[in-house]
Amino acid sequence: MGRVKLPCPVASAAARFPERLAVEFDGQRSSWREAAVAVSRWERWLHDEEIGPGDRVATLSWNRPELLWLWFALGRRGASMIPLNARLTPAELLPLVDRSKARFVVADASLQERVAGARAFPSPTVPSEKEGGLDSEAELAGLFTSGTTGTPSLIPLTVQNFLASHEANAGNLGASETQCWLGTLPLFHVGGLAMAFRCAVMGAGLVLERQFEALRVARLLRRSDVTHGSLVPTALLRVLDVSGEPFGERLEAILIGGGPMGAALLASARSLSLPVLQTYGLTEACSQVTTERRGEADGTTAGRALAGLEVQIVDAEGRVVMPGVVGEIRVKGQTVTPAAGSWLATKDLGSLDERGRLTVHARRVDLIVSGGENVYPAEIEAVLRESGLVDDVAVVPVADDTWGQVPVAIVVWKGPPDEAALFAFARARLAGFKVPRRLVASAELPRNASGKLLRHALMAPGFLS
């Protein structure tokens, strides 16, 4: 649409629906009028800190409303937020902070010590003298996601990416200030940020949770005002485990992303009248790419491409394949990061049926998806090698009823096996979801003539028994 100046969604929502719910958090409710005041105060604080166009501010926090006020204020200053994963260790965070080129880091008090020099969240009180708008082509957020090597890359997402993501979702689920979304996804993941932006554009409510807790989420989904939500399959499973009664009729849609839902989980959800819709998305496309449509969801696919998006399946030579043929998924549209070029090559494997519905057969090469978190074997392997305890190591995914997949390490010990020492080394350097669930000893690992690890051979029973 070209570079344009857009009004701040929070200010627009305040003008249209000043007293409607903007955000509820820990029992405290903020109206859109109050949200606009908060964003204005943060905008003034950023002005005083000399944050302007092109600058970045990193955050390290669990969900809290201040993250949203800061984020929109950064947008009004032409700047960007770099939300860091609050589950990461200091060793994992240090290179991300350096790579982000952020002016500074703002952190929860409980997390502040993980990043040297991180600031505590301030409490701005002075409003801005001038309300800023949003530059459609400016970077609004930068999120880290790993490539197949496990080395994190910073994915820039623009104001237009987030606006297009809202419009794509609205084409499927509608757009109304009467919607109320339950926000359990972390705001350091694209799904959480996309939901918050969507609510602001609509003037809809967001019930924001600090972190996921199954019993509490089950209760909130039964509230009369909650209409929508988004969960990863692991979270859905936990909610169903603690739910004995059907959910309310007011629920319109619960988006399920971060991994396949499975027929059994779908049947369990529907038996309790939970309107789940399977989705496929990724950070580089600002969340959703395909989603099941209400009324035709059957859980066998991730649905058709959302409005404004195109999905292709191509072979190894980049040629578009026929329906039913498995190939690499490519995505095109205004939700896609400008860093991707005209087509986003996802490296995920999938197929389209005759109706254009996507089935995802495998996520990115070597990727492990554990509880909705991306886990890259190469990153874990590099850490385990640093221990000095192993001669060789490979990490593979193993199916898990709770998490979908978990990492397991196959190790060639350098000396006498010392599992306790290797686990301790890993826990000090890796987030908990990345630490291998178990270690399997092997005399050697299968490699080809050039020394490349043959990962498919690692899945044979002999290696994991």
Image: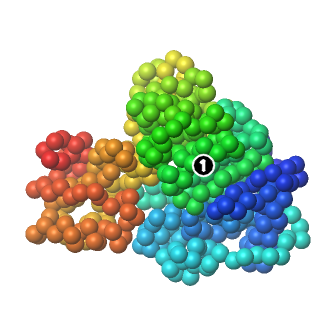
Q: On screen, 366 above or below 381?
A: above
Going 26% across and 53% down the picture, which residue do you hit?
A: 408
Going 30% across and 43% down the picture, which residue do you hit?
A: 399
Front-lying residue, 388 or 25: 25
Q: Residue furthest top?
A: 354
For residue 159, side relative to residue 17 (left or right): left
Whole-percent x, y for residue 104 in the image: 62, 75
Front-lying residue, 4 or 207: 207
For residue 256, side relative to residue 253 (left or right): left
Kind of residue sitting beneath label 1:
Leu
Q: Residue furthest bottom?
A: 117
Describe the element under mark 1 as helix, strand or loop.
helix
Residue behind mark 1 = 220
Going 57% across and 37% down the picture, which residue do you hit?
A: 247
Front-lying residue, 143 or 189: 189
Looking at the rendered image, the quarter that the N terminus falls into is top right
Quadrant in the picture for residue 54: bottom right
Q: What is the count of numbered marks?
A: 1
For residue 221, side relative to residue 369 (left or right): right
What color scheme is it? rainbow
Whole-percent x, y for residue 272 in the image: 51, 34
Q: Residue furthest front?
A: 245
> Is residue 133 visible in this depiction of the protein?
no
Going 68% across and 42% down the picture, which residue do you hit?
A: 224
> Is residue 4 visible in this depiction of the protein?
yes
Q: On screen, 9 above or below 91?
A: above
Neighbor class of circle 1 (other Cα within 10 Å; few <14, some 14-19, many 20+) is some
Whole-percent x, y for residue 461 in the image: 16, 42
Q: On screen, 458 above or below 91?
A: above
Whole-percent x, y for residue 149 in the image: 38, 55
